Image: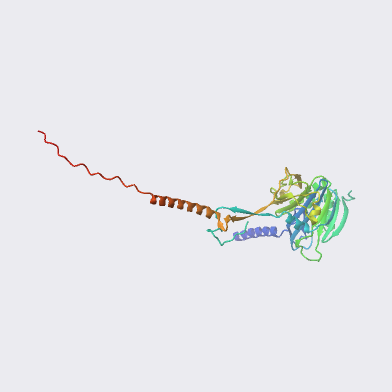
Amino acid sequence: MKRARILAVVLAVLGIQLGWLIAPAYACGCGAMVPDPSRQIAVSSEQSVLRWDGRQEQIVMRLTVNGDADRAAWIMPVPHRATVRLGDPALFDQLATAMAPVHRTRYHFWPENGDWPFDNDDTMDAAAPPAAGGVSVVDRQRLGPFDVARLTATDPAALDTWLHENGFTFPARLKTALQPYVDRRWEYVAVRLAPKASHTPLNGALDPLHLTFASDRPVYPMRLSRLARTPQSLGLYVLAAHRMRTRTTIGGEEPRILFAGRLDKPAGALGKLATGTPYLTALTQQFPEPARISGDHELRRAAADTPVQQVIYEDRLREVAGVPVWLLTTGGGLLLVVTAVALVVVRRSRRPVTPPPPVQPPPPFTPSAPIG
């Protein structure tokens, strides 16, 4: 009986853990994502470019997903009415080139591992007005693999109902998560993803979406990411007139700046987007506990436009004509010492020796006269 109870407990624990493993990941930094309940999907990478010129904000986002789901959806709250179009995938390649690390050579004096005489063959790798019923459809369009609906709503329950009735399947908790946006009278961009070929799993990098809306302050919606069940990460490129920073951490780790600097006459999609906003700030942030996400990222101008760029150093032993400097200096110093000692010895060997003074014989002994 006791063994049966232990077995039951073990099976229950395994069942819970298995449930966690197969539970679909339905959230990402840009909103809420959920596939068919019987399928799985995960956002392995999210890249977003936020451009703000003081009056208007643009967000270009690209998601990389994997799993076995052939349908999925997400929703992006926006503070004002947005226009939506497909973005240029080349934008992200150009950003990667613009913020590429600088390679520099760093010389060291003393030999290290791998330098003679400490040669070592081992190698080591260096280390994104409502109608009756509370919901109004502003527009609905097909953009590549996306079915995009722009919506307004005064009731989160009505919005949740409309989404489900129109094929945008989201988790039950979304209704509660949307309430703060409804209270602030934000609008919504709901996106349903479906590949061109039916029954084809969503995998790889999706086409970017480009959103444009009025905004008197730069903001990146993140609140819906608290619905995620797995740790989340954010990669955000910010184009503005100056270097930017996040106002708070909103429940995640401290954002890390990967790059900050003015772009030098970029071309192509990046050049067009960066016109008037030439300063690029690239940051990344981790959210180990998504449930702690407390709001949206608000961005502020940094205290100074201090540039930041990753530098990769190649360490080399300082040499002269192929000979290590340390060997020349230490060997040369030792040679000088040896030479000096040799000179001293030679000089001493050649110095004339003064003969000792001659030894004078003692005077002859004269016996004294007898005392009478």
Furthest toward the top, the residue is 372
Residue 106 seen: yes
Residue 150: x and y in percent read: 85, 53
Residue 48: x and y in percent read: 76, 54
Residue 196 vertical placement versus 213 (above, below): below
Residue 304 vertical placement versus 227 (above, below): above
Query: Who's the residue at 65% across and 58% down the image?
Result: 13
Query: Which image quarter holds the C terminus?
Result: top left
Question: What count of labels does the image hold?
Answer: 0
Query: Who's the residue at 86% across and 58% down the image?
Result: 141
| Color theme of the render | rainbow
Residue 170 seen: no
Residue 21: x and y in percent read: 69, 59
Query: Which image quarter holds the N terminus?
Result: bottom right
Furthest toward the left, the residue is 372
Please give left or right for residue 12 compared with residue 153 in the image: left
Q: Nearer the viewer, residue 70 or 347?
A: 347
Q: Quadrant of residue 205?
A: bottom right
Q: Which of 320 and 358 is in front in this view?
A: 358
Residue 69: x and y in percent read: 76, 62
Please give left or right for residue 347 compared with residue 93 in the image: left
Q: Nearer the viewer, residue 183 or 264?
A: 264
